[in-house]
Image: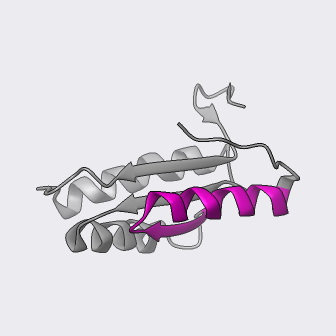
């Protein structure tokens, strides 16, 4: 369930970012750092979040790991996956362990 925080950001317990259809990117290091700054702003409202990132290409796998490293200690529990089903199962398991949520479905 999501809600809007006082700062206008979404509040959530998990995020599944599926980039498996992305074949290439030209994001720069400054662009990646801007994405990190946006994520850190959302972390304030969602410090206990679980994030699964799905990628198919090695370049994107590396970028996802860089993003996680740039987040530093101010980050969610994050995992990068090559397979969407594995990512969904990991999110289900983590939400069940953390919050007792056991009826999570993905479309």
Residue 82 appears in which quarter of the rendering?
Answer: bottom left
Question: Of residues 100 and 69, which is closer to you in this image?
Answer: 100
* Number of marks present in the image shown: 0
| Residue at (23, 53) in percent of width and height | 31
| Residue at (70, 56) in percent of width and height | 92
Magenta stretch, main secondary structure, is: helix
Where is residue 89 drawn, in percent x and y?
63, 61
Where is residue 22 drawn, in percent x and y?
22, 52
Residue 98 appears in which quarter of the rendering?
Answer: bottom right
Question: Of residues 1 and 8, which is closer to you in this image?
Answer: 1
Residue 54 appears in which quarter of the rendering?
Answer: bottom left
Quadrant containing the N terminus is top right
| Residue at (23, 74) in percent of width and height | 58
Vertical placement of 107 versus 22: above or below? above
Give left or right: position of 102 versus 42: right
Is residue 95 in the magenta section? yes
Where is residue 29 drawn, in percent x and y?
21, 64
Is residue 48 in the magenta section? no
The residue segment tinted magenta is: 76-98
Scheme of colours in the image? one colour
| Residue at (72, 56) in percent of width and height | 48
- Farthest residue in the right direction? 100
Vertical placement of 34 versus 61: above or below? above
Question: Of residues 84 and 100, which is closer to you in this image?
Answer: 84
Where is residue 81 drawn, in percent x and y?
44, 68
């Amino acid at each position: 369930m999501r809600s809007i925080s006082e700062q206008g950001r979404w509040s959530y317990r998990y995020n599944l970012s599926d980039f498996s259809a992305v074949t290439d990117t030209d994001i720069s290091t400054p662009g990646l750092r801007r994405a990190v700054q946006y994520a850190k702003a959302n972390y304030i409202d969602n410090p206990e979040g679980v994030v699964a990132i799905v990628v198919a290409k090695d370049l994107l796998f590396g970028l996802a790991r860089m993003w996680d490293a740039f987040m530093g200690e101010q980050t969610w529990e994050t995992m990068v996956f090559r397979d969407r089903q594995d990512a969904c199962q990991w999110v289900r398991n983590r939400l069940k362990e953390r919050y007792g949520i056991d009826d999570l479905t993905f479309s």
